[in-house]
Image (tube, helix red, strand yellow):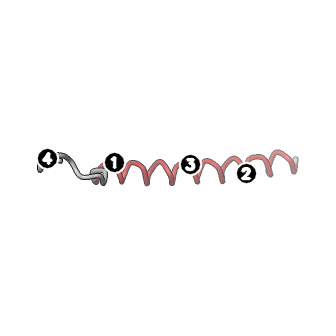
């Protein structure tokens, strides 16, 4: 393994993007549940 090889951990930007995508997925899932509940009530 060369000293110039990148480390296994992803760069900071990639980690932030992954965290943002995870949060967006959670928000989307919760929004879908709320939407189905609202549609089911009417």
Residue position marked by numbered label 4 in the rendering: 2
Alpha carbon distance from label 2 to label 4: 49 Å
Residue position marked by numbered label 3 in the rendering: 25
Residue at coordinates 73% horizontally, 52% vertically from top-left?
A: 34
Depth check: give the residue in front, 34 or 13. Answer: 13
Alpha carbon distance from label 1 to label 3: 16 Å
Label 1 secondary element? helix
Alpha carbon distance from label 2 to label 1: 29 Å
Mark 1 or mark 3: name the one nearer the start of the chain. 1
- Horizontal side of 9 relative to 3 (left or right) equals right
Mark 2 or mark 1: name the one nearer the start of the chain. 1
Alpha carbon distance from label 3 to label 2: 12 Å
Depth check: give the residue in front, 38 or 25. Answer: 25
Q: Where in the figure is residue 6, as x and y percent of width and height?
A: 21, 48
Q: Circles 1 and 3: CB distance less than 8 Å? A: no
Circle 4 packing at 10 Å, graded few (<14), some (14-19), many (20+), is few
Circle 3 packing at 10 Å, graded few (<14), some (14-19), many (20+), is few
Q: Where in the figure is residue 8, as x and y percent of width and height?
A: 29, 52
Residue position marked by numbered label 1 in the rendering: 14
Residue at coordinates 36% horizontally, 53% vertically from top-left?
A: 16
Residue position marked by numbered label 2 in the rendering: 33
Mark 2 or mark 4: name the one nearer the start of the chain. 4
């Amino acid at each position: 393994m060369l000293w110039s090889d990148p480390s296994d951990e992803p760069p900071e930007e990639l980690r932030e993007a992954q965290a943002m995508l995870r949060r967006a997925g959670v928000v989307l899932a919760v929004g879908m549940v709320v939407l189905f509940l609202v549609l089911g009530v009417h």
